[in-house]
Amino acid sequence: MRRAAGPLLSALSLLISLAALALGGLAYYQASLLRRGTLEAVTQTRAALATFPGQTVEVPIRIQETFPISAQIPIREKFEVPIHTTLPISTDVEVPLNIPLLGERRISIPIRANVPIHVEVVIPISRTLSVETSLAVNLQVPVRIDLEELGIEGLLERLDARLAEVERQLR
């Protein structure tokens, strides 16, 4: 039995070695695929960063608020009201008259007239109006940001240099 154990152990260790070699080869292949994918991602990222400063980003900002409003509004105005009319007068006036020998007598005098009136009346208004309300605002405002104006050129250059180093190492 001892003699049969030697070749059996040799075959078993050969099988284990072949399995370990196959697993190592598979791990190397997977690592190679991962390295190629990482290299492609780094290359695409560098290309995207090169176009980054010339782009404009638009972000919609939604504003949905209610603002209370409390105000005192002074009103100081003068209104000119023109009055153009004719005032008719129709009346009888009793006038006392002192007649010698007869004494005091009352005489009725009829008055009939049309009096034209042409006047402009100035009416001043001075008030303070109190306003208490709330204003509901519900809108969406597009905010555009030109990435060149952010001043991040130095940061982009450093990031590109680091990515270039990673790309060089992956090649």
Image (tube, rainbow, N blue to C red):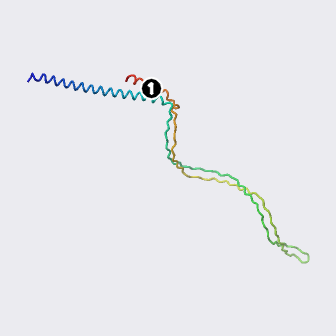
Quarter of the image where the C terminus is located: top left
Looking at the image, which residue sits at the far right? 101
Q: Secondary structure at mark 1?
A: helix
Answer above or below: position of 112 versus 2: below
Q: Position of residue 151 (x, y in %)?
A: 51, 30
Where is residue 61 shown, x and y percent of the image?
49, 42
**Residue lying farthest to the left in this orientation:** 1
Q: Quadrant of residue 93?
A: bottom right
Q: Nearer the viewer, residue 80 or 43?
A: 43
Residue at coordinates 80% horizontally, 66% vertically from top-left? Answer: 114
Q: What residue sits 11% from the left and 23% below the top? A: 5
Give how far across and how far down residue 50 sits, in percent: 47, 28
Q: For this view, does 18 lie left or right of residue 64?
A: left
**Amino acid carrying mark 1 in the image:** Asp
Residue situated in front as seen by the camera: 117 or 40: 40
**Residue at (72%, 57%) from the top-left corner?**
81
Label 1: how many residues lie within 10 Å, few (<14), some (14-19) or many (20+)? some
Per the image, the residue denoted by label 1 is 160
Which quarter of the picture shows residue 115?
A: bottom right
* 12 lies above or below 115: above
Q: Is residue 73 left or right of residue 91?
A: left
**Quadrant the N terminus occupies:** top left
- In the image, 69 versus 116, the foreground residue is 116
Count of numbered circles in the view: 1
User: Is 129 rendered above or below residue 27?
Assistant: below
Q: Position of residue 169 (x, y in %)?
A: 38, 22
In the displayed structure, does residue 41 sit left or right of residue 113?
left
